[in-house]
Image (spheres, rainbow, N blue to C red):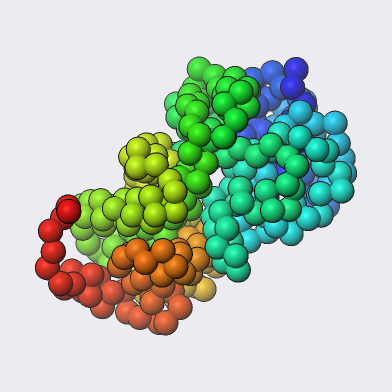
């Protein structure tokens, strides 16, 4: 039995807790909110994360970082991207050297333009850090609906170990050494999903969304390759796979936020309606900054930033995308 601490008790952290418990491991979760611990211990539910899901008695929960970090074989970080660094700093005194850490969150740190594995490596430099990503809605994983993801690690032995820990008959896990590409695919697709939701909110059709997703993949791949990612990663689970599910599903908080914006809500009103952290909003500025830094053209990301932060009308943003200068599709 492997002892696993999950840092973050939102929907994805909860789904991974259920998955790993079903795999026969000892699982504990951490939340920063004592009231959540009290409610969980009383009802065995996390109503704000996965309502209606009753957790088995074998899963523990705590609001104490020392407890969650001590004597664990694996730590899984699943906190929202804006709070990764803050949480890692608080946890650092309790994390041992060579601790295996899996980042299961998606985003880019705006201040540093670091991916989240870069943030964890910056705060916890003597640990072994991997990433888990792919098309994997928490609501479906918790119900054992067939799902496939990828584990990224530069250490193949650790990747193989984590593959064995997470994989089961309904949760297939591949491995890859391209940590950078996996991180960027998982982060940037949230920005494109906002645009896809806006298209839905404006009442556009399948043609529009297909075009947006295809050109979105092109933007993500251009930047990812410029930053050292591998082209095949962006055609894989953490690239095209994650983009498809995030742009298409009602489970997607990024798509839903975009939908509300397309319907006329302001970005802040849209986030209030979603009632969860909308990672794409936090990643959009960082994505644009990275595009400028690496001199990569990302017109969809540019227009999303204008809609989010410059009050640009979404219809005007779409028109500007369609009326860009003529060009070839491939060079």
The residue located at (53%, 33%) in the rendering is 151
Whole-percent x and y of residue 233? 39, 39
The residue located at (85%, 31%) in the rendering is 71
Question: For the image shown, how many numbered marks are present on the structure?
Answer: 0
The residue located at (81%, 46%) in the rendering is 37
Residue 157, relative to residue 235: is it above or below? above
Whole-percent x and y of residue 11? 60, 44
In the image, 297 versus 64, the foreground residue is: 297
Note whether residue 295 is visible: yes
Note whether residue 13 is visible: no
Whole-percent x and y of residue 265? 42, 74
Q: Is residue 72 left or right of residue 139?
A: right
Whole-percent x and y of residue 261? 39, 70
Residue 194, relative to residue 308: is it above or below? above
The residue located at (35%, 50%) in the rendering is 221
Q: Is residue 259 left or right of residue 153?
A: left
| Image quadrant in which you'd find residue 75 | top right
Residue 283, relative to residue 149: is it above or below? below
Q: Is residue 237 left or right of residue 324?
A: right
The quadrant of the rendering that contains the N terminus is: top right
In the image, 74 versus 280, the foreground residue is: 74
Q: Is residue 237 left or right of residue 210?
A: right
């Amino acid at each position: 039995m492997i002892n696993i601490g999950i840092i973050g008790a939102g929907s994805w952290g909860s789904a991974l807790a259920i998955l790993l418990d079903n795999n026969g491991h000892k699982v504990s979760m951490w939340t920063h909110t004592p009231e959540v611990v009290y409610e969980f211990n009383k009802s065995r539910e996390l109503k704000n994360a996965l309502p209606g899901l009753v957790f088995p008695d074998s899963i523990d929960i705590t609001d104490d970082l020392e407890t969650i970090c001590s004597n664990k074989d694996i730590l899984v970080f699943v906190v929202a991207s804006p709070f990764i660094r803050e949480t890692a700093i608080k946890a650092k005194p309790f994390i041992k050297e060579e601790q295996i850490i899996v980042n299961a969150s998606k985003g880019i740190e705006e201040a540093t333009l670091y991916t989240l594995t870069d943030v964890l490596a910056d705060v916890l430099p003597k640990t072994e850090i991997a990433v888990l990503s792919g098309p994997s809605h928490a609501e479906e994983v918790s119900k054992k609906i067939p799902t496939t993801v990828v584990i990224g690690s530069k250490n193949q032995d650790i990747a193989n170990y984590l593959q064995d820990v997470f994989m089961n008959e309904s949760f297939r896990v591949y491995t890859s050494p391209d940590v950078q590409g996996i991180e960027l695919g998982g982060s940037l697709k949230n920005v494109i999903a906002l645009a896809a939701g806006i298209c839905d909110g404006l009442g556009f059709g399948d043609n529009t969304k297909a075009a947006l997703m295809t050109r979105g993949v092109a933007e993500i791949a251009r930047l990812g390759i410029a930053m050292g990612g591998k082209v095949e990663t962006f055609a894989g689970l953490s690239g095209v796979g994650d983009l498809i599910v995030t742009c298409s599903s009602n489970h997607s908080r990024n798509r839903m936020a975009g939908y509300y914006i397309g319907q006329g809500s302001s970005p802040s009103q849209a986030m209030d309606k979603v009632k969860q952290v909308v990672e794409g909003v936090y990643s959009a500025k960082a994505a644009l900054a990275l595009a400028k830094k690496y001199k990569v053209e990302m017109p969809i990301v540019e227009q999303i930033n204008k809609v989010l932060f410059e009050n640009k009308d979404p219809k005007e943003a779409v028109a500007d995308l369609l009326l860009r200068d003529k060009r070839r599709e491939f060079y």
